[in-house]
Image (spheres, rainbow, N blue to C red):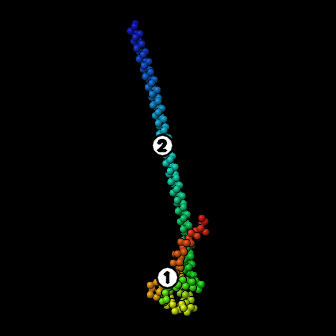
Amino acid sequence: MENKEIREAILKKARDEAARIVDEAKEKGGTVVAQAQERKNQLLEDEKNRIIAEAKREAAKLLAQSTLKERQTILRAKDGVMQEILERARKELERQPMDRNQIEPLLNEALEALVTDGTVRLFVAPKDSEAVREFIQTRDELKEKIVEVKEQDMMGGIIAETADGMISIDNSFERRLAMLIPKILPEIGKKLFGG
């Protein structure tokens, strides 16, 4: 009987050992599964955060682009208004003939700038030709100094040059407007649009 008891003792010990090994394996397996689940959850959280961060970056980028486009649209509209104002001013200058009060200062400025004792030739817009000639006839010093008044395609004003053509003073409305525009555009913009 002793063999039977020994056998039973060995089997019991083997069963106990097997149960202990299975329990340890289950415990280790549970730990591995828990760690895997935790790792999976962390990866999912990381991916979710990455996607959210990417979406936020994309949203910020789209917002910045939209804001830029809006500003560009507003600037184009403002520029269109400014260009329309300038175009109207140009048309008015082209349409309106000069009078004596405009001719005299323009002519005096041009002649003073030439600094010549010689004769002078003038270029004027066709609409101003007669008025300039009449003004010259009222001044003896101008009748002697100005030998010719020629018509030129321009908005108005006066271009004076020495008789030999070596020196020319451009006092045309185009030139004066070109010099004035950079100074007045910011002022016009402030009055129209504030700021």
Please tell me how crowded label 1 is: few (under 14), some (14-19), or many (20+) other residues with Cα within 10 Å.
some
* Residue 127 drawn at (x, y percent): 54, 85
Placement of 118 over or under 80, stated as above or below: below
Q: Badge 2: few (under 14), some or many (20 or more) residues near its Cα, within 10 Å? A: few
The picture places residue 54, in percent across and down from the top left corner, at 49, 48
Dot 2 falls on a residue whose secondary structure is: helix
Q: In this view of the protein, can residue 41 be seen by the observer?
A: yes
Q: Nearer the viewer, residue 8 or 151?
A: 151
Q: Which mark is residue 13?
A: none
- Which residue is nearer to you in this view: 122 or 139? 139
For badge 1, the amino acid type reads Ile
Return the residue at label 2. Answer: 47
Task: Name the residue: 54% across, 69% down.
Answer: 80
Q: Is residue 98 visible?
A: no
Mark closest to the chain's N terminus, 2 or 1: 2
Task: Give the vertical position of 69 relative to 49 (above or below).
Answer: below
Image position of 14 (left or right of 183): left
Which quarter of the image is occupied by the N terminus? Answer: top left
Q: Quadrant of residue 130?
A: bottom right
